[in-house]
Image (cartoon, rainbow, N blue to C red):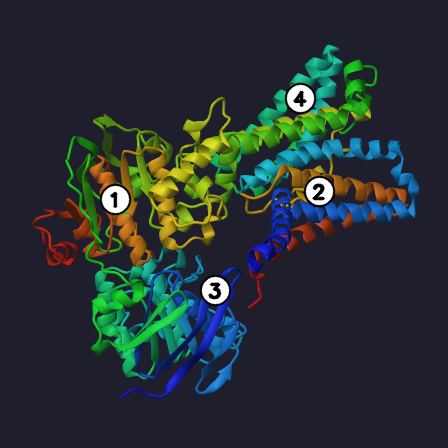
Amino acid sequence: MTSSVQEPAKMAPATHMALQRRVLAAVGVQNVSLLLALVVLVAFIGAQNSNFFYASNIATIGTTIAIVGVLAVVQTVVMLLGGLDISVGSQAGLTSVVSAMVFMATGSALAGIAAALALGLCLGLLNGVVIIYGRVNAVIATLATFAAFRGLANLVSDGRAQGYTGVNHLFVFLARGDLLGIPVLIWILLLIAALVQVMLHYTDIGRNIYAVGGNATAARLAGIPLNRYIIGCYMLVGFVAALAGILLTARTGSGQPTSGSQGLELQSITAAALGGVALQGGRGTIVGTILAVILLGVLENGLIILNVNSFWQDIAQGALLVIAVVIQQRRAGGNGVGLP
Amino acid sequence: MTGAVLLHMDNVAKRFGAVQALRGVSLNARAGEVLALMGENGAGKSTLLRLMSGVHQPDSGSIAVDGKNMAFATPHAARDVGVRVVVQEPEIIPDVSVAENVYAGALPRRGRIFDRGALRAQLEHDLARYGFTGVLRPEQIGRTLSPAQRQVVEILRALTGGARVIAFDEPTSSLSDHEVESLFRLIAQLRAEGIAIIYVSHRMKEIFRIADRILVLRDGASVGERPAAETSEPELVRMMVGRDLSALFARSPRSIGRGVLRVDQVTTTDVRDISFEVRAGEVVALAGLVGAGRTELAHAIIGDTPILTGQIEVDGKRLTLNSPRDAVRAGLALAPEERKQQALLMKRSVRDNICLAVLGRLQKLRFVSRAEESRIARRYVQELRVRTPTINQEVATLSGGNQQKTVLARWLASDAKMLILDEPTRGVDVGAKADIYAIIDKLAAQGSAILVISSELPEVLGLADRIIVMQGGRIRGELTRAEATEEKILSLAILEDAA
């Protein structure tokens, strides 16, 4: 009898714990830590300068992270596959120039956008082909195209900003328009993130991407066409990098060969790594990446608001990439290189 | 007769999360004695070895070497006092020579200059001393070594490092029979030199051939220790699992039907002129020594490596094999020898692993229903008796036997009609072995065509309807179930001109 009376009292904390564990498992430990870091950062910056909380400042953060955000989302996809794309920034620069030049030549924004997107697919295809048929390591292959695409962008543009899109409604809408009070740039980021999230979690394509990154040999022996997945993912990156290039053109009002796109590769890789995407592939989530993108955006904005020398931003970025990977390795529990 | 106690483990216990891997086990390793450790997978043998080698530290209990208490904080600490564990899959530096692999960290030098000649001489001397001449060439590159050769490298590392206590963790699982013989000769030699040997194995015959004492573990506890001369196979089996093994090979009536797989004069870089057929409802075994080309043949059939000449037919239709995808689509499936490296997504769930090959068929407009996947996973977990808490369990946490069942479940879920199973019970405990044999038997009875590659002769004899024996990349003979004996298979596999 006594035991049956005591049982409910014992049960209550147990189920409570189970619920906590379930919530934690659903959100993910990585994401909880990112959220905590974000809260601490926001509290710290806000305490130093309350202008941080102005709606206009929040919108600024949102629009600044949109371009790096879409790139981080697709960077996540290639990293899940076990690859890496260092050329995203150069792809964005080249497509930015081309979108503006085609727009100037044809007078049609749609033509400019279509040309950029088609070029993006080709650049991605080139990366994929070099990696697969040249059997070049993904880091080396995209490091090479990182330089080549940048060179091409400077070549076709003569190293100068091209055209002027500030008079075109479509470009202006992309850069400064809003829907339901939320900037279009943020909508685009949300849309891309949502589409990729659906692809990763609800389609066989996404599940196979995780499988290829988790164990390429096993995936191959299970009949998954590795080459098609690798090419497909790099083409997806190319397409989205072209979208980023178009947004870059829209925001600055002209096609930019390097300005604005330089450094996007580092930022997108940092965001993905910080968001918990395993560098070996096979593990990571879009939610984590997006949280990391927000964290990086808030940090950058905070440093500006607090009048920190802008060179510190690069240092902070580099430090964060190392910290993110250190945390990953610690959680994976392996021995460090060179340690007994 | 037996010497001093070199290594003494007293009442050691170890817990990993929710699992109590060891609950107080004691052992003595004496100079000049072979102590065998037996037990099913999960009984705690591996954990015991890891405590011994300093990979893990015990939660309680103590470890003493030469009567002095030791706390092995790292594998280095254990090595420094002469305790070495020869693991199943040793770390091999892929791009340097055998000699540099063996003496890594202690290369001979003249001043600061690395002395290549001395290194070679030293290795040749040590190879001769331990009876490995001809097994390894000093200049051979790490990545080209077979599993057996890797093991020899690891043994040499232990011996040249001055080990006095050497533990072997299932050393013969990757060795062919004649390699096993040389290993046993080596162990006898080491024993005579006063080294204490701890030998972990599932194989009864080996244990009785070389062990002086046998310690049996079950569920992390010691069940008992017996002098080898005073116990028997049935007693040990009872101690390990508490049940009889006579029913290990169940055999349902099989009706052999039409040909499913036809291999016609296939030549690759590793095998020459291979022709055979596997029919529906038939289990064909590919026997032979490690290195006879069986695994390579399997990978060629599945489209993983190129076929130079010859062809593969499935159901009478010739296959164009550009990648494993073509084979999988035709209904062929390979459960590879290296499960962890080649078959499993270790960090993903049992469900994801089971559904890997069936996703393409489940998708509607590329969307896959999680509920449908879970239903399939549950069905096969139940049917194959995969012991896992839930289908969401990470595969890495399962035992070898349950990992193998997960791989089998993948191919059953995808309705493969021709299964190629490469060493299906490697590293699998006795209980799970019986389960896997029963699964193979049931599949054959249901009309699947099955090709089993196995280096364990009892397994070959127990499972197969026909046995094809390979040697040096060629087929040396074929035996029916009725005429096959261990001796006949072995002579075809070893002798130069048997045919």
Residue under pointer 4: A116
Image vertical order of residue B250 relative to residue B414, above or below: below
For marks 3 and 4, give the CA distance. Answer: 60 Å
Q: Residue at x 51, y 73 (%)?
A: B76
Q: Is residue B76 left or right of residue A6?
A: left
Amino acid on which the number 3 mark rests in the picture: Gln
Dot 1: chain letter: B
Q: Chain of mark 3?
A: B
Quadrant holding the N terminus of chain A: bottom right
Query: Is any atom of residue B134 visible in this view?
Result: no
Q: Is B122 left or right of A286, judged from the image as shown?
A: left
Residue at image location 81% in from the left, 47% down from the top: A41
| Whole-number angstrom distance, CA of label 1 to CA of label 4 | 56 Å
CA distance for labels 2 and 3? 38 Å
Q: Which residue is label 2 attached to?
A: A292
Q: Which residue is mark 3?
A: B20
In the rendered image, residue B56, in percent from the top left (x then y), is placed at: 51, 68
Residue receiving disc 1: B440
